[in-house]
Image (cartoon, rainbow, N blue to C red):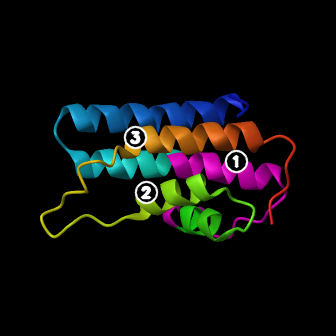
Amino acid sequence: MIFDPATQKAIDLELDHAETARRNANEGMARVCARRAAGIAIRALLTAAGEAIPDPSAYVLLTRLQAMESTPAEIKTIAGNLLTRVNPDYTLPPQTDLIAQARMLIDWAAKHTKGEHFD
């Protein structure tokens, strides 16, 4: 990863919390932690690109990443999945592993933190 040590530590902590929540059958908390980890990575990506971040919430950052033309379709889909609301019975579609998807988004952001500028 290319993130600075403090950013990487924050991401790892959120992903660890997500895994713990999943082991404790708390998929809602796992989703929240996965989303926060992705938000930290997006914040680092946008900051490295010189972009202003008026609202640092993971939800806003995922929405912003999803709306950017330069974001690949697969990453937009992952961002959308991380933004998905739970069903009325507080569940997500069964095929959605948001922790794994957050890791893919984080890896993509790490690879692009140095170099590419985003719209």
Q: Which is in the foreground here, disc 3 or disc 1?
A: 3
Mark 3 element type: helix
Q: How would you rate the neighbour count of disc 1 (Cα within 10 Å): few for under 14, some for 14-19, many for 20 or more? A: many
Q: Is residue 77 above or below residue 19?
A: below
| Residue 76 percent coordinates (x, y) | 57, 60
| Residue 33 percent coordinates (x, y) | 39, 46
Mark 3 and mark 2: Cα distance apart in space: 9 Å
Q: Is residue 33 left or right of residue 29?
A: right
The residue at the point 73 percent across, 68 percent down is 69
Does residue 54 show up magenta in the picture? yes
Which region of the structure is painted magenta?
38-59
Quadrant, the N terminus: top right
The residue at the point 70 percent across, 34 percent down is 3
Mark 1 element type: helix
Residue 24 occupies quadrant? top left
For the residue pair 119 and 51, the one nearer the viewer reads as: 119
The answer to whether the residue labelled 2 contacts the one labelled 1, judged by CB atoms less than 8 Å apart, is no
Q: Is residue 108 above or below residue 69?
A: above
Q: Which residue is labeled 1 in the image?
A: 44
Q: Which residue is labeled 3 in the image?
A: 99
Mark 2 and mark 1: Cα distance apart in space: 18 Å
Q: Amino acid at mark 3?
A: Ile
The residue at the point 61 percent across, 58 percent down is 73
The residue at the point 62 percent across, 45 percent down is 41
Mark 2 element type: helix
Q: Is residue 40 left or right of residue 71?
A: left
Q: Amino acid at mark 1?
A: Ala
